[in-house]
Image: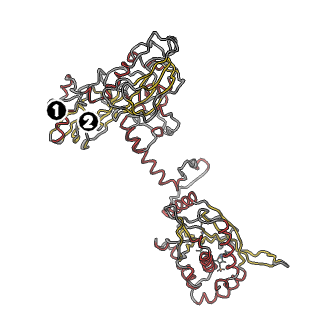
Amino acid sequence: MTSETILVPDLGGADTVDVIELCVAVGDTVALEQSLIVLESDKATMDVPSPQAGQVKKLLVKEGDKVSEGSPILEIEKTADETDSAEESAASGERDDAPQPEDKDEPPESAEEEDSESEAVDKPDKQAEPSAAKGPAAEEDVLVPDIGGADAVEVIEVMAASGDQLAEGDGILVVETDKASMELPAPFAGELVSVAVKVGDKIATGDKIARMKIMLDSDQPGTTDKTAEPDEKTGADSASSPSEKKVSAESDSSETDISSGKKPDVAEAPVASEESSKPDAASTRDDVAAAEVYAGPASRALARELGVDLRKVSGSGPRNRILKDDLQEYVKNAVAKSENAAVSGATGAGIPPIPTVDFARFGEIEMVPLQKIHKLTAANMQRSWLNVPHVTQFDEADITELEAFRHTLKAEAEKRNSRLTLLPFLLKACGHALAVNTSFNRSLASDGEHFVEKKYIHIGVAVDTPRGLVVPVIRDVDRKGLWELTDEVNEMAVKAREGKLSAAEMQGGCFTISSLGAIGGNGFTPIVNAPEAAILGVSKSQIKPVWDGAEFQPKLMLPLSVSYDHRIVNGADCGRFFTCLVDVIADIRRLLL
Ligand code: CAO
C-alpha cells in the first residue's frame, strides 16, 4: 500500500478558489470518484472526486481555505490493486510518481477526459450562434453544447417556458452529471418558442433542447451582442436582464464549472440571491421556488436517494448552500417529528399542526412532564382517531330490574369478600351481544383483503388510574359466570391502580367497555380501541319517566353509546347489536335463553 497526495485539479485558469465543504474525514475509506471536497469560486462550485479508492490518512485543507491548482488536498493510502487505476486517473491532476504539490505546473494528464464537468463551461462558446443576417423573426434551434465527453447528462430542471423573453445567457435548462450540475444558457437573446426536453430526459452534445426566436433589437435588455461569445458576458449583464429573478435564483448555475476558468454565462444563484441568503432560523424553504435551491451535485444526489425535497432544507453552507449535513439533519428532524407527532399535535399527512403558544404570556404556568403511559395513550388515541372512521350511536337501557337484582346480591357479595357493581352485568350482556352479532367481534386484517372474525370473546375494561388510563382485558367473558367476572374485574382494577398489570393482561381484547357511570355525565363518544371494531361508553344512570302505553313509570335508565369502525360495522349492524344489548340488560334472564 502506498500513500499519495491528492492535489487540486486543473482549474482552467481560475486563480484561487475557496474550500467550502470537506466531504471526507481522516480514516474514511473512499471509493474511486467519491467527492473529496467542494471548491467554490465567486461564480461556480465543483466537487473534486477522488482519483482512486483508498483510506484518507491526512487532510491538508480545511473549510474556508483558499487553494489553487496543484494545492495539496489530502493524503490517501491506496490499496495495492488501486495503484494502476490511480495512475490512470488524472481527476486530481497528479501523477502517481510525482504526487507532490510542486507538480502543479505540470498539467494533468487526462483532465480533459476525466473531468467532464470541468469542460462544461467551454461548451456554450461552441453553441451555434444565430446568423446576423436573419430577420427579427428568424428562429434558431438551441443545441446542447460540447459537454466534454460526457455521454449523456440528465435534465434536472427546465428553467424557462415557451414565450419567455430570454436575454443571452439566461438559463434554459439545468443538467447534471454524477459530479456536477450546469446550466445550459440561451446562446443569444430572443423569445423562447419551445422547449424540446423535459426533466429526466438524457441529452448529449448536439441534441436540440429548444427553439428560439432571435431578437435583433440591440436595445433589448440583456441583448448585448448576439454574436458575442458567451464567456464575454458578465454577471452584471445577467443581473440586469428581464429574467433576473429566474436566472439569478438558479443555484445550479453556480455549479457549472470552475475548472475551465471561464466566466459562467449566467448570473450565479448565490450572488443574486443575497436577500434570500440572509439567515432566518424560523423560516423553512417551503415557499422557495425550485430554482432557488443552492446545492451541489453530491447533496442533490443524496436528496434524491433520501426522497428529500431540497426546497424544504435550510442550507448552512456559504450563502445558504445546502450541505450533506443539512440533509442529514433535516431527515433526522423529520423522523423525530413524526415519532413525537401524536404527543406534540403535529400530525403530518398535510394536517396543519396546532400552533405553539407561549402560555406564560397569559399567566403563571408549570411544565408537568408526560409519563410514559400518557405518551402511549396519546399515540394510541391519535392513531385510532385518525385511522378509524368513527360513528357513534346512542341508546338507553332500563336497568331498574337489574339494579334491584344486583342489590339482592350485595350481601352475598360481601360474604364472598367481593364488590358486585354494574360492570360484571354489562360484561356479561356485551359477551352475549358480541356472540350474537359477530360483525362486532371482527378486526380488519392488515392485508386489506379480509376480516378477522374471532371465535373468542375477550373484553377490555378502561380503568382510570392515578398514572393514567389502562385497559386490562377480561378473557372468555361469555364462558364465565357473574361471580367469576366480578372477582376478575375487582382484581384487574386493583392491579391497574397499583400499576401491576402485565402487558399480556392488556392484550387480546375484541371490544372495550369504558364506564364513566360512577363519575357522571349523560353521554359521550368513546374512541374505538383499534383494531377492535367497537367500544361501549357507559354514562350515569338516572330515574326517568318512561311511558308504558298507559302511564309514565319511573325507570332507572342507563345511557349507553357505541362507537364503531364504519369499515367493519354498518349502522344497521349497530342497531341490531344495540337492541340485543339493551334488551338483555333490561331483562337479564334473557342470558339464559
Ligand atoms: N350509573 C350510576 N352509578 C354508577 C354507574 C352508572 N352507570 N356505574 C357505577 N355507578 C356507581 C354505583 O353507585 C356504584 O356503587 P354501588 O355499587 O355502591 O352502587 C359505584 O359507582 C361503583 O363504581 P366503581 O367505579 O367503583 O366500580 P365500577 O365497577 O362501576 O367501575 C371501573 C370500575 C374500573 C370501570 C371504574 O372504577 C373506572 O375506572 N372507570 C373509569 C373508566 C374511564 O376512565 N373511562 C374513560 C376512558 S376514555 O377517557
The answer to whether 273 is drawn above or below residue 437 in the figure is above
| Nearest to the observer: residue 424 or residue 581 | 581
Which residue in the structure is indicated by mark 1?
96
Position of the C terminus, as image quadrant, is bottom right
At label 2, which amino acid type do we have? Ser
| Label 2 vs 1, first from the N-terminus | 2
Q: Residue at x 34, y 24 (%)?
A: 146
Q: Secondary structure at mark 1?
A: loop
- Residue occupied by mark 2: 50
Quadrant housing residue 453: bottom right
- Left or right of 593 in this view: 60: left
At label 2, counting other C-alpha atoms closer than 10 Å, the crowd grade (few under 14, some 14-19, many 20 or more) is many
Q: Is residue 274 visible?
A: no
Residue 196 visible to an observer of this rendering: yes
Instruction: For ligand 1, give the image quadrant.
Output: bottom right
Amino acid type, mark 1: Asp
Q: CA distance from mark 2 to mark 1?
A: 13 Å
